[in-house]
Amino acid sequence: MSSFVAIDFETANEDSDSACAVAVTAGRDGRLVGSWSSRIRPPTAQFTFTYVHKLTWEDVRAAPAFDEIWPTLRRWLNEADFVAAHHAPFDSRVLAACCRRYGLPPPRVPFQCTVQLARAQWNIYPTKLPDVCRRLGIPLRHHVVESDAEACARIVLAAEAAGWRWSESDHGLQVEEIG
C-alpha cells in the first residue's frame, strides 16, 4: 500500500493564493497515521467565502502567512507517494498559487482526485464530498479543513480496502501543471 497525504484548503476569496486554512491527514499501510492543520493569513483582508467556511479576517489576522507554514507543510507533502484531494484541481491550484506568490518551488508530488476515485471505484454520483461520505459512511463536518482532509483520507483508505492501488503511471495532476 502507498503512503499518502490528503489535503484540504479553504480560501478567503476567489483568488487562488488566498488560502486561509489548510489541513493534511496522512495514511500509510491502510490506516491514518497523523494529521496537521493551520490557519493562514492570506495576502489581503478580503473575505468573501466566510458564508462557506465561517472564517473571517479576525480569525486569521494573527495567523502565519503561507511562507511561514510552508516548511511544515512541505515536510508532510514530501513524505507521501501522492497527495489526495477532493476535487484535486482546486487544492493543487491553491497550493501552486500560494507557492508562486511567495517564490517557493512547488512540491513535485502528484495529486490523486478523490472525486474521480469515487466515480471509478464505486460509480458514485453526485460526487460532492458530503455525498461520497454519506455513501461510504464517513463522518464529515463539511468545510472544516481538518474534517475534510480526514474524510478525503478515509475515501482513499476505503478505495484501497476495495482493491484500488496507487500507480505512478496512472497518477493525476502535478502541482506545476496547474499553475
Image (cartoon, rainbow, N blue to C red):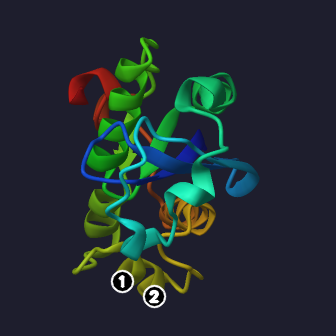
Number of numbered discs: 2
Position of the N terminus by quadrant: top right
Q: Does 125 sit left or right of 158 as displayed?
A: left
Q: Foreground residue, 8 or 101? A: 101
Could you tell me which residue is drawn at 41 percent across and 81 percent down?
Answer: 130
Q: Is residue 75 above or below residue 128?
A: above
Q: Is residue 72 above or below residue 138?
A: above
Q: Does 108 sit left or right of 118 as displayed?
A: right
SS under mark 2:
helix
Give the residue type at disc 2: Arg
Position of the C terminus by quadrant: top left
Residue picked out by circle 2: 134
Q: Is residue 2 visible?
A: no
SS under mark 1:
helix
Measured in 3D between alpha carbons, the distance from the residue under mark 1 to the one under mark 2, in whole angstroms, is 5 Å
Disc 1: CA contacts within 10 A as few (<14), some (14-19) or many (>=20):
some
Could you tell me which residue is drawn at 59 percent across and 47 percent down?
Answer: 61
Give the residue type at disc 1: Asp
Residue picked out by circle 1: 131
Q: Foreground residue, 41 or 21? A: 41
Q: Foreground residue, 51 or 94? A: 51
Q: Which mark is residue 60?
A: none
Q: Is residue 77 visible?
A: yes
Residue 71: x and y, percent?
Answer: 66, 22
Marks 1/2 in contact by CB < 8 Å: the verdict is yes
Residue furthest right in the image: 33
Q: Foreground residue, 141 or 124? A: 141
Could you tell me which residue is drawn at 23 percent across and 30 percent down?
Answer: 178
Q: Is residue 98 above or below residue 166?
A: above
Disc 2: CA contacts within 10 A as few (<14), some (14-19) or many (>=20):
few
